[in-house]
Image (cartoon, rainbow, N blue to C red):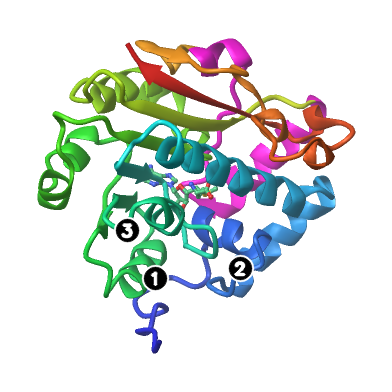
Amino acid sequence: MDEPDWTSGIDQSQASVARVYDYLLGGAHNFSADRDVARTLEAIEPQARTIAAANRAFLARATRYLAAEAGVRQFIDIGSGIPTQGNVHEIVQRVDPEARVVYVDHDPVAVAHSTSILAENQHADVVQADVTDPGSILEHPTVQKMIDFEEPVGLLLVAVLHFVPDDRDPGAILAALTAPLSAGSHLVVSHGTHREHTGEAVRQVYRRAVAGGQATLRTADQIRDLFAGFDLLQPGLVHGPLWRPDSPADVPENPERFWFLAGLGRKQ
Ligand SMILES: C[S@@+](CC[C@H](N)C(=O)[O-])C[C@H]1O[C@@H](n2cnc3c(N)ncnc32)[C@H](O)[C@@H]1O
């Protein structure tokens, strides 16, 4: 499929969170400023690509559980990124071709690329919005059209909330986003957590060189608090590779080196 020019109007001198992540995942929607940042990250954290892939794999396992086992048929994926492979709509529409997905990201390249790959998918769409403004997401006409708030929703906030600083009150953002969800809805979160000195060095690179890259790493207790009103399902909040691995062989020797925590909760 021909893709529209996703580079137009983009400041290519400024790295973005979405494009750095795209590069780490082996994608092609990034510029040299993004690759420079990614290489700096890899110099600090040689496992950066493996960690990004493990986060993406957690997203896939959690989404597959929601569609195939929990019976969820509508999803809002906030901070959805630049789709590479294993996108939420691909996973859930394999279970039910009519399962609905609304992607949300504030990054214009992520939105342009999503728009392009979803052009012929009647049950998936993308919205450009900022997670720090929950009203702009919940009241967006596309969300209103595609999501039935009387039915359970899968709300995904995967590797995005660490880009919400404390002064934007992530707890209040979660409360606003989850208030309209019916009982039996699910919340999926992965979130960067502290890891000795490496975490601080990575945080500094993002803060200095990446637009909107003011990262806040949080403790397990702080991340658990984001699940207020939800029961964390087994195995609770754990390092990403430990969340229901497909096979024991997929669990690395030191999962705590994968410095993000992941969990899935069910609304009471
Ligand atoms: C590390 S990527 C994660 C992508 C995807 N959720 C995943 O886990 O594979 C983080 C994404 O969050 C988006 N993001 C960061 N801050 C955001 C904000 N304030 N509002 C909406 N999206 C945001 C970035 O543009 C990027 O696409």
* Image x and y of residue 105, in percent: 36, 52
- List the residue tagged with mark 1: 113
Which segment did they paint magenta?
196-224
- Residue 41 appears in view: no
* Image x and y of residue 190, in percent: 55, 33
Q: State left or right for residue 203 relative to residue 122.
A: right
Quadrant position of residue 38? bottom right
Of the residues under marks 3 and 1, which one precedes in the sequence? 3
Of the residues under marks 2 and 3, which one precedes in the sequence? 2
The residues bearing labels 2 and 3 have C-alpha atoms spaced at a distance of 38 Å
The residues bearing labels 3 and 1 have C-alpha atoms spaced at a distance of 21 Å
Magenta includes 27?
A: no
Quadrant position of residue 182? top left
* Image x and y of residue 91, in percent: 46, 53
Name the secondary structure under disc 2. Answer: helix
- Residue 82 appears in view: yes
Are circles 3 and 1 on residues that touch, CB within 8 Å?
no
Name the amino acid, label 2.
Ala
Name the amino acid, label 1.
His
Name the secondary structure under disc 3. Answer: loop
Tell me the tag on residue 97. 3
* Image x and y of residue 202, in percent: 70, 41
- List the residue tagged with mark 2: 33
Q: Looking at the image, which residue is at 56% across and 71% down? A: 30
Q: State left or right for residue 42 relative to residue 95.
A: right
